[in-house]
Image: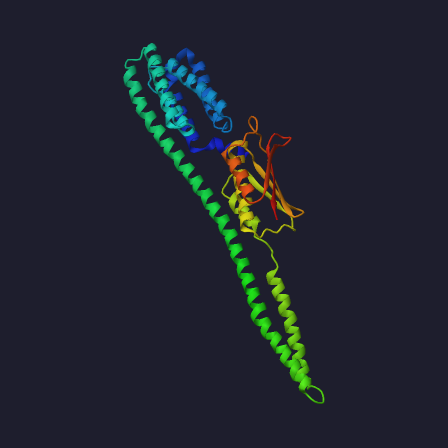
């Protein structure tokens, strides 16, 4: 329940509701016998204003909602044209438009709204309709600029969070790659240097034992046995160091999804999956990154399920969310870039629609 109410309790919404309450108090006396209709319009404006905020994934419905809000606001102005406070509703509306749309679309809408406001005030017998429209036009411009820059700051913060997550994920892969390279270098040094000297020591002990007449001393035999055991231990240690455990892809992917409020990442990587090639790991990372972004922007998904398993000499990756595509599946720049990146890594990519209407991605890469 709290998750559904959270979008409705944003600061702009709370400020708008408080302003609507102030408008209701100020026009109460002017409404007269039309008071029930006025209160009904105020309640309808408040409810629709909150409802529009929940239609983030349906731009055409939001457009209809904003049009209805404009009609309701102008109707309230027509019911109470003389108090001069009912046009505040248009200030709220223009601020909301500035959050959702670019200035190139907000400016024509504001001009039309204020032209309609002037005509309604003039028809209602307002003493100075032009002055009132001018005053409220200034309020609208101020509210629109504040809302626009607040939205720009929020978008910049979100982009910065995504870039930071990208850097953290890339750093995790680079750290794993550097760690594996250092382990391999250390294993080679042990094998080439310590192994060579131990072999020479064993041969010298054997030669010394063969020169002894009447049998080698017990200490010499113990030294030969210890040298052989140390050689076996060294071989085992070198083998353990050379064992390729692969890059820690899970940590990198979770770091990539951490700043996104949705969708949540559900990751399943089979135990036999080993990814040692940084190029393959980076291709997987970018594919999941684009899937997360695509699901958040277009699918309105809450969960993104990612499964990575071994399929013979290749890796099989399946990605599916719980959202729903709007319209037919089309490959935009993001999906096209994903396909190109996978092809450069020797992989293959297929897009389809799940039975629930969500986008499904199936990929195959060299292991």
Image position of 221 (left or right of 74):
right
Give the image location of residue 274, x and y in percent.
61, 51
Quarter of the image where the N terminus is located: top right
Image position of 95 (left or right of 227):
left
Give the image location of residue 125, x and y in percent.
32, 10
Q: Is residue 2 visible?
A: no
How many marks are shown on the rendered structure? Answer: 0
Give the image location of residue 176, x and y in percent.
53, 55
Q: Nearer the viewer, residue 48 or 144?
A: 144
Instruction: Report the residue at 55% width, 67% height from top.
Output: 189
Give the image location of residue 21, x and y in percent.
41, 24
Instruction: Report the residue at 35% width, 13% height from top.
Output: 120
Say which quarter of the image contains residue 322. top right
Say which quarter of the image contains residue 117. top left
Instruction: Report the residue at 58% width, 32% height from top.
Output: 323
Q: Nearer the viewer, residue 90 or 258?
A: 258
Is 242 situated above or below 127?
below
What colour-coding does the image apply? rainbow
Instruction: Report the residue at 42% width, 11% height from top.
Output: 33
Q: Nearer the viewer, residue 220 or 80?
A: 220
Is 123 situated above or below 359?
above
Q: Is residue 171 visible?
A: yes
Farthest right residue in view: 214
Farthest bottom residue in view: 214
């Amino acid at each position: 329940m709290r998750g559904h109410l959270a979008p409705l309790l944003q600061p702009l919404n709370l400020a708008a509701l408080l302003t609507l309450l102030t408008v209701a108090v100020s026009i109460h006396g002017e409404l007269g016998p039309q008071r029930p209709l006025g209160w009904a319009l105020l309640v309808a404006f408040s409810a629709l204003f909150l409802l529009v905020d929940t239609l983030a994934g349906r731009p055409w419905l939001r457009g209809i909602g904003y049009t209805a809000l404009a009609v309701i606001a102008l109707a309230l102005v027509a019911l109470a044209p003389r108090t001069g406070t009912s046009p505040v509703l248009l200030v709220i509306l223009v601020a909301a438009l500035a959050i959702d749309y670019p200035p190139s679309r907000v400016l024509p809408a504001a001009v039309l709204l204020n032209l309609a406001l002037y005509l309604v005030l003039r028809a209602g017998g307002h003493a100075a309709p032009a002055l009132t429209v001018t005053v409220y036009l200034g309020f609208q411009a101020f509210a629109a600029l504040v809302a626009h820059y607040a939205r720009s700051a929020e978008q910049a913060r979100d982009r910065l969070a995504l870039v930071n997550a990208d850097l953290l994920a890339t750093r995790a892969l680079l750290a794993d790659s550097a760690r594996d390279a250092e382990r391999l270098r250390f294993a080679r040094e042990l094998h080439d240097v310590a192994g060579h000297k131990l072999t020479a020591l064993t041969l010298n002990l054997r030669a010394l034992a063969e020169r002894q007449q009447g049998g080698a001393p017990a200490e010499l035999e113990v030294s030969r046995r210890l040298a052989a055991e140390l050689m076996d231990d060294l071989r085992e240690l070198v083998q353990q160091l050379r064992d390729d455990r692969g890059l820690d892809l899970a940590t990198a992917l979770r770091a990539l999804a951490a700043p996104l409020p949705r969708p949540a990442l559900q990751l399943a990587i089979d135990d036999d999956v080993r990814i040692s090639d940084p190029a393959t790991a980076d291709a997987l990372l970018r594919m999941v990154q684009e899937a997360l972004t695509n699901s958040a922007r277009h699918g309105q998904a809450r969960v993104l399920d990612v499964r990575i398993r071994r399929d013979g000499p290749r890796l099989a990756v399946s990605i599916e969310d719980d959202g729903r595509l709007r319209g037919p599946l089309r490959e935009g720049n993001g999906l096209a870039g994903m396909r190109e990146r996978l092809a450069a890594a020797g992989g293959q990519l297929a897009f389809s629609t799940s039975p629930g209407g969500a986008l499904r991605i199936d990929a195959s890469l060299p292991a």
